[in-house]
Amino acid sequence: MLKQQQRSCERASVVVSSMDNDGRMELRDVEADETYEVVDYIDSELATKLRSLSAGEAVNLELLSGSESGVFGAVRIESSGPSARFQ
């Protein structure tokens, strides 16, 4: 479960690998051109929204950093889908 006291950040990203059965998904930060994993979610509703995303779709997420480098928990989704697609 995500901890409220962690520092959050917002990232404009593209889905590299959609969410797997363990709840992990890989994304690429558009600005930094780095990949990272989302492994935890603030609630099941957000997890369900993110599970519906396919590789190549864009998403703006508010994230909390995890205990490992390059691993995050999702707090809020700003926008997603083909209409939010990034280059």
Image (cartoon, rainbow, N blue to C red):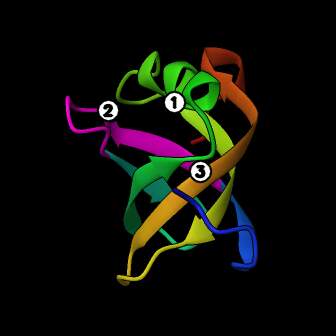
Evaluate if marks 1 and 3 touch, with contact meaning CB atoms under 8 Å apart.
yes
Give the residue at mark 1: 47
Of callouts 2 and 3, which one flags the residue occurring earlier in the amino acid sequence? 2
Amino acid type, residue under disc 3 in the picture: Ala
Query: The residue tagged with tag 2: helix, strand or loop?
Result: loop
Whether the magenta-drawn stretch holds residue 5 is answered as no
Give the residue at mark 3: 74
Evaluate if marks 2 and 3 touch, with contact meaning CB atoms under 8 Å apart.
no
Tell me where the magenta segment starts and ends, as one range. Answer: 12-24
Q: Nearer the viewer, residue 2 or 15?
A: 2
Amino acid type, residue under disc 1 in the picture: Ala
Give the residue at mark 2: 19
CA distance separating discs 1 and 2: 9 Å
Whether the magenta-drawn stretch holds residue 18 is answered as yes
Q: Residue 23, percent across and down? A: 31, 38
Of callouts 1 and 2, which one flags the residue occurring earlier in the amino acid sequence? 2
Of callouts 1 and 3, which one flags the residue occurring earlier in the amino acid sequence? 1
Query: Which class describes the residues within 10 Å of circle 3: few (<14), some (14-19), or many (20+)?
Result: many
Q: Residue 43, percent across and down? A: 61, 36
Evaluate if marks 1 and 2 touch, with contact meaning CB atoms under 8 Å apart.
yes
Q: Residue 4, percent across and down? A: 74, 68
* Quarter of image, res 19: top left
Residue drawn at point x = 35 percent, y = 82 percent: 68
Compared to residue 77, the image places residue 80 above or below, namely above
Amino acid type, residue under disc 2 in the picture: Met
Compared to residue 37, the image places residue 15 above or below, namely above
Give the foreground label among 1 and 2: 1
